[in-house]
Amino acid sequence: MPQSGVGSVAGGGARLLGLIIDLVLASLVTTLFVTPSLQDPAVMQTFNLWSVGVWAAITAIPAAFFGFTPGMAVVGVRVARLDGSQMVGVWRAVVRAALTFVVIPAAIRNIDG
């Protein structure tokens, strides 16, 4: 992979901003179906569970078919396979979303980022 420019590894700031945008978008979409109530823990627990599900959907589905999530599109970051294939694929996108959920990619990095 090139050191900089198109095709290079995205920096941590762009990745974090894309994740934050995806999380905010998931919360906004969830408010269409579940009205949050900060004073009611049961409602907030339901809201949070639905937000996680919405986040998983807006992370895995677009990444599988288009190579980016909505937040990644805003910051100009893409997911790419190293073998050159165009589509990431559903199972890779689901595994990527699951690992992102448990913060593994942020904790484990190699020399290339």
Image (cartoon, rainbow, N blue to C red):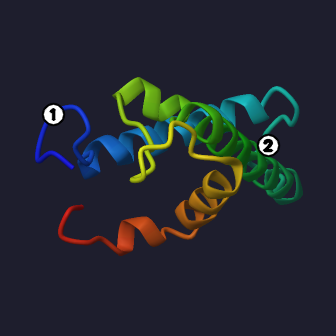
Amino acid at dot 1 = Gly
Left or right: where 71 falls relative to 106: right
Tell me where residue 5 sits by quadrant: top left
Q: Secondary structure at mark 2?
A: loop
- The residue nearer to you, when weighing 49 against 105, is 105
Residue 4: name its quadrant: top left
Which mark, residue 15?
Answer: none
According to the image, label 1 marks what residue?
5
Which residue is pictured at 86% across the width and 37% down the height? 34
Q: CA distance from mark 1 to mark 2?
A: 44 Å
Indicate whether 97 appears above or below 32.
below
- Disc 2 packing (10 Å; few <14; some 14–19; many ≥20): few
Of residues 4 and 34, the one nearer the viewer is 4
The residue beneath circle 2 is 37
Q: Quadrant of the C terminus?
A: bottom left
Residue lying at 57% horizontally and 58% vertically, measured from the top left: 96
Image-based side of 73 in relation to 91, left or right:
left
Above or below for 70 versus 22: above
Say if 41 sits above or below 86 in the image.
below
